[in-house]
Image (cartoon, helix red, strand yellow):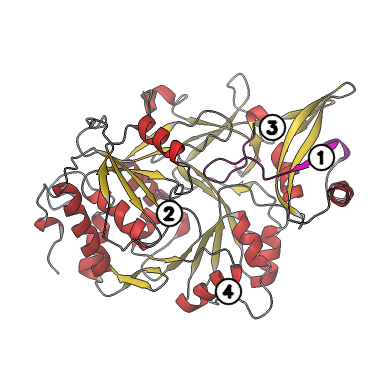
Amino acid sequence: MTSTAARLPWPAHGVCSGMPARVTDALFAHARARPDALAVVDGETRLDWRSLASLVESAARSLRSGGLLDGDRVALRANDGAAALVALLAVLHAGGVHVPVDHTLAEPEVRALIATLRTRWSIDLDRSAVPGVIGFVATGLPGIADPLGSGASAFMRQSSGTTGVAKGVLLSHATILERIVAANQVLRLGPDDRVMWLLPMAYHLAVSILLYIHHGTAIIFANHMRASVTARIARAESVTFGYASPYHVRQLARLPPGEDLPASLTRMVSTTTALDATAAADFRARHGIPVCQALGIIEVGLPFVSPGDAGEVPGELGSPVSGYQVAIRDADGMDCLPGACGELSIAGPGLFDAYVEPWRPRSEVLDRGFFRTGDLAARDDQGRVRLLGRCKDLINVGGVKVFPLEVETVLDAHPDVVASRVQSRLDPRTGEQVHADVELAAGVDHALARSALERWCAERLAPLKRPAGFTFGTALARTPSGKVKRDG
């Protein structure tokens, strides 16, 4: 197969032209070296590397002929799958900046995102979309010169906004490539691996999907409402690695006998939110596979992937990935002693390039070269880090520090609980008390749930950490990425 890039009607990229490398360069290298090897499975759609590269090249040509220029921001709203994957790779290969849009957002939310991030083009794909066929329309907004230099920018996404105003985060091709190299030191994925993909691509891309593409790892789209269907896909495709959320870990742990995950699956990584108190243990007991806890931060990358040891405590992240440095600092900016709680700050490869709208380059955001995460953490004398919660969410009960994350992981482990949010309430005796907002599974009686959760917490939490009150109601407010909002 001849070089795909060499046939493009716009300047080629990567080592063949001396221009900066792009995150899609490896795709075409795989198409040349391993054209018939499996690249993507999405239902009945199966693509080898040659087919994937051909579809991406054709779609990129359409984008360029339609008017896309280097640095143009392109909003992509699509269901996860092969069509969405081809579209986002085509945007990157054509020189555009990929701006993912959650397909579940309402139209006013989509319009607001497009206006805020000033995207010039929009791609909207429905479930029936055919890979490589792109509905590409202008938004009416003017194009913007790439603030990082022509062709440098690759990706822009709003942060989740869990505790405050969401920010537009800009990543360059070089930054993403740095993240990919760093993350794979611990993920160790290669061309013989097949990833069971269960997360939304609108929120997980730079150190997951693009890492798989870079290292020639096959992507198996396996997310389904029924865990038994996910397991069936995993068996049929002999997946070797799983990337999931705690929700998926819990559901797969509850699979009945006979609905097993394949013996080829040897590693499972859970991210998005903290694992609850029993999910990893239940998954290991059911399938004999460890679950590693990963901390992914859009401004940082993937600085932590825990060992997945038996008995790991929720939030116990282990040592940072090689190349990353960690600082835990108190309110005065001084380094904390081992065991003391402070704000987690991280330095290392692939830190974000800038916030946009308003523009703030990385150099103006970092504190002594470190990104302040806003997370509370503690580090032991061996350098292992445990995540405790958000700085602003700490609850002081009669002088005892209570971390909402710790209480939430206990609540979320109860089989009747869908999600929980722990916050402080004023108390005349102790100053503050712990209060839990709880989303229950359908049909669970509130009165019975209250007494059951009181007993559950009494067995697992110290007295001052136990919720003094519960509120049961409808679904808890969530960010677009599915995290429970702290202020909602």
Front disc: 3 or 1: 1
What's the distance in space between the residues labelled 3 and 1, CA to CA? 30 Å
398 relative to 81 in the view: left or right: right
Q: Position of residue 116 (x, y in %)?
A: 38, 30
Q: CA distance from mark 2 to mark 3?
A: 32 Å
The Cα atoms of the two marked residues, 1 and 4, are separated by 37 Å
Dot 3 amino acid type: Ala
Residue 31 part of the magenta-drawn span: no
Q: Which mark is residue 261?
A: 4
Q: Is residue 259 left or right of residue 204?
A: right
Q: Main secondary structure of the magenta part?
A: loop
Residue beneath disc 3? 340
Choose mark 3 or mark 4, whichever is in front: 4
Q: Which x, y percent locates residue 421?
A: 70, 40
**Which x, y percent locates residue 124?**
34, 50
**Earlier residue among tags 1 and 2:** 2
- Closer to viewer: mark 2 or mark 3: 2
> Which residue is depicted at the point 26% across and 29% down?
147
Magenta extent: 463-488
Q: Amino acid at mark 2?
A: Ser
Q: Between 61 and 296, which is closer to the camera in this rendering? A: 61
- Earlier residue among tags 3 and 4: 4
Q: Amino acid at mark 1?
A: Phe
**Which mark identifies residue 389?**
none
Q: Are marks 1 and 2 in contact (CB under 8 Å)?
A: no
Q: Which residue is painted at 42% across and 62% down in the image?
A: 189
